[in-house]
Amino acid sequence: MSMIRQVGYCTNVHAGADLDSTRANLAEHALAVKELVSPDTPIGVGLWLSASAARKLLATNGVADFASWLAEVGLVPFTLNGFPYGDFHKDVVKYDVYRPTWCDPQRLQYTLDLIEILDALLPEGMEGSISTLPLIWGNPSPNAAQLAACAENLTKVCERLSRLEAERGRLIYVCLEPEPGCVLQRSDDVVRFFKEHLLPHVERQDVCRYLRVCHDICHAAVMFEEQDEALRRYRSAGIAVGKVQVSSAVVLPLDRIPRDERPAAIEQLRGFAEDRYLHQTMVRQSPNAPPVFFEDLPKAVESVEGSTAPAGEWRVHFHVPIYLERFGLLETTMPQILQCLQAAKDFSGLVHFEAETYAWGVLPKRLQQPKLADGIAAELKWLRDQFSP
């Protein structure tokens, strides 16, 4: 059962800040998605539980009841999103999503709580994954002591997961999720961290079995990193990809837009600048030029104000529906999804695929669906079609 491909969507799109609202939102939205996509069979979901919700679930001995309810309604929680720690839908999230860091004992405890919960929620014989923060935000750059603290806490996670498998036969792995602007933002950053900070101190078989990568397609695309090259780099280093988050970024293809229409294209892109989430942006002036990084979309737009002939290609960390290839003058990185799914066929142990368009609530109106469940269902149907023979 563990090697059967699991496909689902991440419920952080309708996340609740506390346990009651989490369960209520699952009942309202996830069950509506299931009715549209898979009315007669269970459906995979990636659960997000805030740190406070996870702690309450354990403190009140509510995990067994939660597991029974999920099984009864046909939701299979094969993976957890352990990246956001607190309220993911408050008015302003921005940099808060990167706190606490992996230097902090709070991040370690939150992840240990999620491991205990996932073990109890998973059907018998199924392996589980937990995606997590890529250590720490990259500005300012962490010092050696901070990186050592991150490595020490992750080592404790590996030790816990090793004991779990030895005692229960349950395989769960925690997956670092590279993201633009973080210490780990490209595949070579991950490989370097493993080689310099983990492998010198821990047995390779323990680290590489229980600590893996969550490959977010949008994040790699924003960094102008080819999907197949990233996956090959991990495999060459002996690092497993435990989970793929299927997501798509916004592209401003200025060089493919007539000069007189470029101001309108930038204005359309400006509509994606919103206050809740950080939308890291990479701007590449030409195919051979190194991309320039902007921490948020408004800063990138400001950089070309007054320019008469902006050029190049922009890629923006804004998760848009994965079935879209273009809209108006803008495009998406949907072709990168197809490239990644094709490359993933060569990785027999990679079985977790999770659609993660968490930004439905802040999308421009023209891209939204009448109901949230309609949009999520359309994504899952499209994704399932990509896996069809």
Image (cartoon, grey):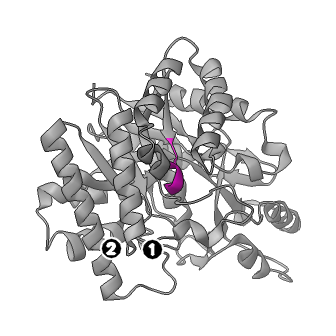
* Pointer 1 residue: 136
Crowd tier of the residue under label 2, counting other residues whose Cα lies within 10 Å: few below 14, some 14–19, many 20 or above: many
- Compare residues 110 and 291 and report the one nearer the observer: 110
* Pointer 2 residue: 150
SS for callout 1: loop
Q: Give me the residue at 36% from left, 64% from top.
A: 108
Q: On the picture, is 93 further left or further right than 76?
A: right
- Compare residues 60 and 105 and report the one nearer the observer: 60
For the C terminus, the quadrant is top left
Residue 158 can be seen, yes or no: yes
Q: Quadrant of residue 127?
A: top left
Q: On the picture, is 30 further left or further right than 331?
A: left
Which region of the structure is painted magenta?
Answer: 47-53
Residue 272's place in the image compared with 321, above or below, is below
Q: Quadrant of residue 20?
A: top right
Q: Amino acid at mark 1?
A: Ile
Mark 2 and mark 1 in contact? Answer it, CB < 8 Å.
yes
Q: On the picture, is 125 further left or further right than 291?
A: left
Residue 153's place in the image compared with 67, above or below, is below
